[in-house]
Image: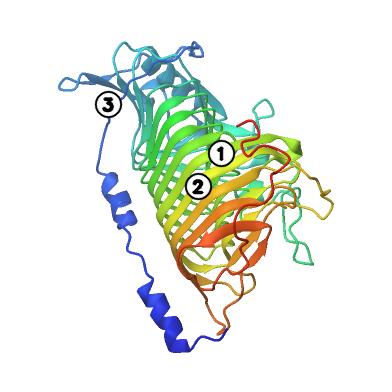
Amino acid sequence: MILPRILILVFLFSSCVSFPLIQDKLNSYTKQKHLHTISRISLPPDPAPEAVSPSYNVDSASNITTFNVQSFGAIGDGVTDDTQAFKMAWDTACQAEKSGILLVPEGYSFMIQSTIFTGPCKSGITFQIDGTIMPPDGPDSWPLTSSKKQWLVFYRINGMSLQGGGVIDGRGEKWWNLPCKPHKAPNGKTLPSVCDSPVAIRFFMSSNLTVQGLEVKNSPKFHLRFDVCQDVDIELLNINSPAQSPNTDGIHIENTKNVKIYNSVISNGDDCVSIGAGCYNVDIRNITCGPSHGISIGSLGLRNSRACVSNITVSDSVIRHSDNGVRIKTWQGGLGSVSKVTFHNIYMDTVRNPIIIDQYYCLTKNCPNQTSAVSISDILYSNIKGTYDVRSPPMRFACSDSFPCTNLTLSEVELLPIKAQVVSNPFCWNAYGTMQTLTIPPVFCLLEGMPQPMQQSDSAGC
């Protein structure tokens, strides 16, 4: 199908989506100060070392105490190890009878080792980062006794806010350059990674969390990760690392429910947002994503595992100069389901794979064919417009031989090549669905109706 150049321009300019000025919100947030939070958790905090008697600043109007890490001996010169001062500040704030603010002051850089901040806390804590926090500089500086899988961990916290106008700098460059990290081989393929690198910020078994306003950059691996959490609000973040930095997902969630990710800018070397198994009720809105690998559900079903994901919405967002746009990826042999997913009002700017379902996800050429699969159903793509890189089809629905994708719905999808005049055809394999409106390009390869009854139930135990 040949489209005249003038028609392509009409589609491009008529298809633009207006979005709020995210960066202005990010800048304005830095002027905001302390929020009031509530906490109720269960494990005792680590004992704190002895130190000079700290001074506290109590706001008489709000009755909130500020625990400045410098009052506990932190230096903030970017070289001195301030770990013990942070631990003491945390333990003191955590044991306080009334809500407190753990303050990392502006104008200082604090170097701290791999640390677990643990509850229970008697009242709410706001972890206010106005300065800079950084880990040791690379694997050679990492203590042998510290975990190389994580840096800052918040464990069993209920009701905490991590916020501020400061910076969390993961200093990841020396980790990315390790020989075991994935690098481009001479044939252009990516070699797999086989070594540990720390996640910058991890929340584990926590609830009622707020993360907002911060710049998080250059993580050795994932920037933020949430495991077994619920009721998480993420807003006004600026996450960035180089496009070639390996495994640097912006935000990863696993076995986590009731998540809101709003009004943030993410540029990194992997997925802007990745959604793992056991995630429900996730709302992603007004995200500027890229360069990156896009926004992904998966990968799911690795090593014949069960994965259940549902009620996911991605809307009002921009994805630019990325390997993928919106993606669902599963391994062969898995169980479970992905259902009730909506991708709405998304603008693609020079994206290689704007819309993709891949039930044959594999990082090598040696993945065996298997009959079972994580089933995929009830997926809506509406008002998705923009341009794609012509090296790949604009839409790819590669579904399982045994468990086809069902009830895929496309409405107002307009994707045009960034350079060439020829619009590439979509790819479909065992994909059932409908076009509510004529798409560009048309997805005539979708199968109508429903497939024959499958060997496993649609929910597969979900």
- Residue at the image position 67 percent from the left and 25 percent from the top: 145
Q: Which mark is residue 341?
A: 2
Q: Which mark is residue 36?
A: 3
Quarter holding the N terminus is bottom right
Residue 314 image point, x, y percent: 45, 50
Frontmost of labels 3 and 1 is 1
The Cα atoms of the two marked residues, 2 and 3, are separated by 34 Å
Please tell me whether mark 3 sits on a helix, a strand or a loop. Answer: loop
Q: Is residue 126 left or right of residue 141?
A: left
**Most foreground residue, 28 or 143:** 28
Please tell me whether mark 1 sits on a helix, a strand or a loop. Answer: strand
Q: Are marks 1 and 2 in contact (CB under 8 Å)?
A: yes
**167 over 382 or under it: above or below:** above
Quadrant of the rendered image containing residue 338? top right
Residue 450 image point, x, y percent: 62, 52
- Residue at the image position 61 percent from the left and 47 percent from the top: 376
Q: Can residue 270 be seen?
A: no
Please tell me whether mark 2 sits on a helix, a strand or a loop. Answer: strand
